[in-house]
Every structure is written in structure tokens, then in C-alpha cells.
Image (cartoon, rainbow, N blue to C red):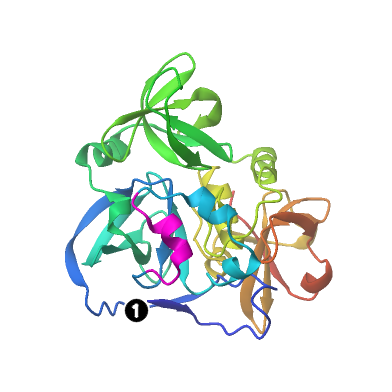
């Protein structure tokens, strides 16, 4: 179980504080599994601090054939705020996990693509067992084949080359092994071992990606107006550091999952030297609580809190004016 170590003496709706976690592995009632790899086989799943279903509403995201988009869009501010401390991160279709333990329809996993200093295996937590596939063919393809990543907020995953039979959506930065190229579509390996198809226009190859300030800002702007979701890392909703993590993944750079660890990665820069794509960090009482991405002209794009959406603000506007901790560059 993880919990925020920092105590923020402000209403949680005011600040994004997914920044520092303490890990413990007290799996009361859980059966340890021999460590094995798997992959997420639903469009998205939340990683929970504990197994179980606290709210009836969350059946939308917990069901075997879940509906993360309906789940995200159906929540008001109070419902989104409730997620603070309940969920840890969001995993997207095709993302790899390490299976750590099993308990009554749940599995404890670690997510290698979500870096956290406390666990070299990746961000840990609980997800429904029905959301994980353990297909050896897919996992081998992940290891051996080139990949493509979704560059738009959403793309369709189809079961036919003509892109007429839609299976489900794939969020921004869903990354899948590439099998074959066609004129208008690409055949990709799916987590359940089947073959699916994506539109060529919706994806980009991950091999050879180099950092582009113009591209990372353009991709960030796609999410303006998207409601904040605590622990979110996809086009269903982002928290502050989930947004910056995915944006940097789009540039081939895997930075840590949480804001406090992102702040110690990369290279420190001075305010007068800021360039688009640099990250801006904010702290109170010495504890980092928020991150935004600089886009030029003294502005940043960021996901502030559970009562707001992805937006553009001045890096020293209002509440943030006295809280700037520093700036980091990763490319």
C-alpha cells in the first residue's frame, strides 16, 4: 500500500500533490505469485492502493469489459476528488506489468514503464485480474519488434485491414508491436495474442524518435480542456505528472512517474534559459506538489487539480507565484 507522505494543508482540489509515495508490501490475504509478465488487455485500467470496489460507480472501470471513457466523463468534481489516495496510476492498453500477487479476482502488479525510485520493478498497486493478459507471443513481440504509438488523443483499434470493424479505443501513447504495413493501416500485435489494425494517420513509429520542442508542445495542446483525474496518465484524464510523463514518452524519453522524482531527473536550468518542453516545479514547505511544462512566453501547460482541466497559465501566476521550486530539462 502507498500513501502520500506529504501533508498538504490546503483543500485537495487546490493542488496536484501526486508527488511522493511510501511503498510497503503488506499483502494481507494475498497469495504471492511467481513473478511473471503480463500486459493490459483493456483500453485502460486504474491501479488501486488496495483491492476491492469502494464505489458502485467504479464498476465502469473495474468490469472485465470496462468503459474507461464513460467512467471518466461521468464523474463530477467531487467524484474525481474522491480518487485522491484511492488510486496510484493509470495503465493503458498493451502496457507491460510484473505480476506480484493474487487475491480474489485482483492481482498486485508493478508497472515497469512507470518509474518510481522505491521499486525498481515499477509503480506497484492492484488491478482486476481480468484486465491482464499473459500471452507469450505478444510479450515476445514487444521485446523483438518495432513499435508504433498513438499520437492523437484517441485512435480506433480495428479487427480488419479496412478499419471498419472497431474493437475499442486506444489512448494517446498506447504503444503496440508493428507486424505489417498496408496502404492506409498497420497490423499490430494485441495483448491477447490476436492481430489488430490502426490507422497510419493516428500513430508514429517509436524507433528513432528525437526530442522536438515544437512537437511536444503541439501534442500537449491536444489535451486543453480535458478534465483532471488523480493518477491519470491517458486521454481519459491526466494528473500533473501523468501528463508530463506521457508527453516525454512521446519523445522517446522515459522520465519518472511522480513530480517529486521528475524534479530530480534531467538537468537544472535557470528561468532565463527556459525552452519549450522544460518542466517547471512547485513546492510548499520544501515539498514538491506540482509540475507543468513550459511552452514559451512565460507560459506553461499543466493539469492543476481535481476541480480543473488541462490549461495554460503563466508560470508565476496567482497561487503559483511564490512556489516555484525550479526547472528541469531532459533533452
Image location of residue 155, percent across then percent down? 52, 34
Examine the rendering and report whether any part of residue 76 can be seen: yes
Q: Which quadrant is home to the N terminus?
A: bottom left
**Residue count near mark 1 (Cα–Cα under 10 Å), binned few <14, some 14–19, many ≥20:** few
Residue at 79% x, 73% y is 319
On screen, residue 137 above or below 327: above
Q: How many marks?
A: 1
Residue at 64% x, 82% y is 286
Quarter where residue 80 is shown: bottom right
Image location of residue 230, percent across then percent down? 56, 65
Q: Is residue 57 magenta?
A: yes
Q: Nearest the camera: 330 or 61?
A: 61
Q: Nearest the camera: 169 or 19?
A: 169
Image location of residue 193, percent across then percent down? 26, 35
Secondary element at image label 1: loop
Q: Is residue 246 magenta?
A: no
206 relative position to 35: left or right: right
61 relative position to 82: left or right: left
Determine which residue is flagged by label 1.
24
Seen as rendered, the residue at the extreme left is 34
Residue at 42% x, 15% y is 182
167 relative position to 248: left or right: left
On screen, residue 63 above or below 15: above
Seen as rendered, the residue at the extreme front is 56
**Range of residues picked out in magenta:** 53-64
Image location of residue 84, percent across then percent down? 54, 72
Amino acid at each position: 500500500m502507498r500513501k502520500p507522505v506529504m501533508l498538504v494543508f490546503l483543500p485537495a482540489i487546490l493542488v496536484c500533490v501526486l508527488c511522493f509515495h511510501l511503498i510497503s508490501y503488506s499483502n494481507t490475504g494475498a497469495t504471492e505469485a511467481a513473478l511473471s509478465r503480463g500486459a493490459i488487455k483493456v483500453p485502460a485500467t486504474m491501479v488501486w492502493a488496495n483491492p476491492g470496489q469502494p464505489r458502485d460507480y467504479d464498476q465502469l472501470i473495474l468490469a472485465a469489459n470496462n468503459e474507461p471513457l464513460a467512467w471518466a466523463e461521468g464523474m463530477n468534481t467531487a467524484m474525481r476528488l474522491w480518487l485522491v489516495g484511492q488510486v496510484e496510476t493509470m495503465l493503458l492498453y498493451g502496457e507491460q506489468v510484473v505480476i506480484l500477487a493474487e487475491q480474489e479476482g485482483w492481482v498486485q502488479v508493478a508497472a515497469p514503464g512507470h518509474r518510481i525510485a522505491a521499486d525498481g520493478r515499477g509503480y506497484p498497486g492492484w488491478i482486476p485480474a481480468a484486465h491482464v493478459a499473459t500471452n507469450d507471443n505478444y510479450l515476445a513481440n514487444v521485446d523483438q519488434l518495432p513499435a508504433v504509438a498513438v499520437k492523437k488523443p484517441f485512435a480506433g483499434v480495428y479487427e480488419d485491414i479496412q478499419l471498419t470493424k472497431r474493437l475499442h479505443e486506444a489512448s494517446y501513447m498506447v504503444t503496440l508491436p508493428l507486424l505489417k504495413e498496408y496502404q492506409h493501416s498497420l497490423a499490430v500485435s494485441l495483448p491477447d495474442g490476436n492481430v489488430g489494425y490502426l490507422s497510419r494517420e493516428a500513430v508514429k513509429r517509436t524507433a528513432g524518435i528525437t526530442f522536438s520542442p515544437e512537437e511536444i508542445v503541439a501534442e500537449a495542446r491536444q489535451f486543453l480542456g480535458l478534465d483532471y483525474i488523480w493518477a491519470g496518465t491517458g486521454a481519459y484524464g491526466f494528473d500533473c505528472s501523468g501528463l508530463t510523463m506521457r508527453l516525454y514518452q512521446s519523445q522517446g524519453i522515459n522520465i519518472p512517474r511522480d513530480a517529486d522524482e521528475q524534479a530530480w531527473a534531467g538537468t537544472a536550468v535557470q528561468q532565463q534559459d527556459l525552452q519549450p518542453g522544460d518542466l517547471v516545479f512547485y513546492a510548499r514547505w520544501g515539498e514538491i506538489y506540482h509540475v507543468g511544462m513550459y511552452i514559451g512566453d512565460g507560459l506553461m501547460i499543466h493539469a492543476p487539480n481535481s476541480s480543473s482541466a488541462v490549461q495554460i497559465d503563466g508560470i508565476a501566476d496567482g497561487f503559483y507565484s511564490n512556489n516555484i521550486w525550479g526547472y528541469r530539462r531532459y533533452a
